[in-house]
Each structure stands twice: as structure tokens, then as C-alpha cells.
Amino acid sequence: EDQVTQSPEALRLQEGESSSLNCSYTVSGLRGLFWYRQDPGKGPEFLFTLYSAGEEKEKERLKATLTKKESFLHITAPKPEDSATYLCAVQDPFGNEKLTFGTGTRLTIIP
Amino acid sequence: ETGVTQSPTHLIKTRGQQVTLRCSSQSGHNTVSWYQQALGQGPQFIFQYYREEENGRGNFPPRFSGLQFPNYSSELNVNALELDDSALYLCASSGRFSPGSEQYFGPGTRLTVT
């Protein structure tokens, strides 16, 4: 069964202080690894899909990377509006396209 | 392009009652997945519909059921509500076997069971 573990559970940073969020996963085969951002009481907002080890994707202050065992979401010079819960999910190539999520990292950026 | 929409936004039900939640998929998407998100947890897969057929189910009892309509919109029905069913219910749509297989989520329906 697919498993996803995210760390840390919560992270508080000063505005401009760069850091990384970790997502480690166990799957029988990886079809894709997905990063979402979720604001309180709202649905997850799609950020990135990564497919193979070594792949990287960037969007504004965010960069996602992938290895065979884990993914990192790097946040460079964050702003208060980057505060949210960041969710990682994996999709295996067998059967349907269900996503298996981690419990997320709650990120707070302090002005 | 219209995104995923869900209704209602909030709902309060009593234990033992039945509830129906609705979802309209994003334009051009033919697959709908439903997820349950308890407070402080990640979304948990309930089931997926493709071409009006259930196409995979997570670890949820049969009192959770669904439908997909010819326009790809979908319903989630929950019978005999229990207190633990209180959660945010999320609908996600995707294009089946599209290269990215990205799922785009709606805003969710907050269900409270008392």
C-alpha cells in the first residue's frame, strides 16, 4: 500500500528565511508525485507534478525536486502570503488514478 | 474555463440521516474523484467515477455511494450518518489518462454531523 510521510508537521519562518519541506514516500511504482497548497477551509490548489528522479519544477518562490525515495519543496525568501498547508501526494500506475496524501506541513511566515 | 464547483458549502445533519453532495467537474474533464478530509489530516480517497462507472474505491463502507452523470458532474451520497463522518468532502476532476493526470479540487463541502 502506498504511504506518504511529510515533515515537519509545522514550520514557522521569518519573512525572507528560506527552508525546505520534506515528503518521503513508499509506492510499488510511481506514476506521479504531486504538491498542493491548501488554505484553511478551502480545497487543495495544484502546484506541481513530478514524474521521475532528478526532475525539478519551479513556480515563483517554490521549487520542487524528486528523488527515488523523497521529494522536497524548497521555499526561497518566503512572504506572509505563502502561509498555508502544503500537501504531498503520490499516484501509482496500477488501476485508478487515486491520490494518496500525506498529512501536510503547516507553514507560517511571520512578517 | 470553469473550475470545479461543489454544493452546498456547508451542511449540518443529525446522526442517522442521509446526505447528498454535488460536484461539477472542470470543463473538459471526464473523471471525478471524491475525498474525505478530517481536521488536521490529508484527504482520503473515497472513490472515483469515469464514464458514469465507479472506477476504484478506497477503504469506505458501502453506505458511501456515488453517481456520475453524462455531463460528468457527480454526486456523493452518505446514508446512516455517523459522528465520524464530520469532515470536509472534496471533489476533484481530471482528464482520464491525460499526460499529467493532475486532479483539480473544488472548494469542498463542510459536513457536520451532530
Image (spheres, rainbow, N blue to C red):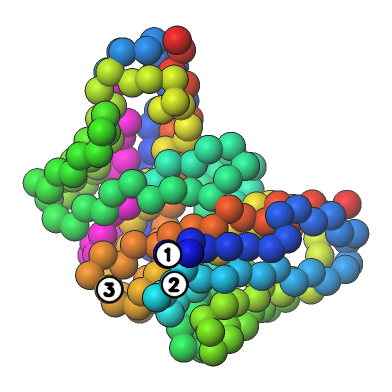
Q: Which mark is residue B98?
A: 3
Residue closest to the far left: A54
Residue closest to the far front: B1
SS for callout 1: loop
- Judge depth for marks 2 and 3 and give the one in front: 2
Asked if both marks, 1 and 3, belong to the same chain, the answer given is yes
Q: Main secondary structure of the magenta part?
A: strand
Question: Between disc 2 and disc 1, whose residue precedes?
Answer: 1
Magenta stretch in the rendered image: A19-34
The answer to whether residue A10 is above or below residue B114 is above
- Residue B61 in the figure: left or right of residue A98: right
Residue at the image point whose x is 46% and y is 12% from the top: A110
Question: Could you give the CA–CA distance between mark 1 and mark 3, rounded to whole angstroms?
Answer: 17 Å
Q: Position of residue A97 (x, y in %)?
A: 37, 71
The answer to whether residue B31 is above or below residue A27 is below
**Amino acid beneath label 2:** Ser
Q: Which residue is mark 2?
A: B27
* Mark 1 crowdedness (10 Å alpha carbons): few <14, some 14-19, many ≥20: few
**Amino acid beneath label 3:** Ser
Q: Are marks 1 and 3 in contact (CB under 8 Å)?
A: no
**Amino acid beneath label 1:** Glu
Q: Are marks 2 and 1 in contact (CB under 8 Å)?
A: yes
Q: Which residue is mark 1?
A: B1
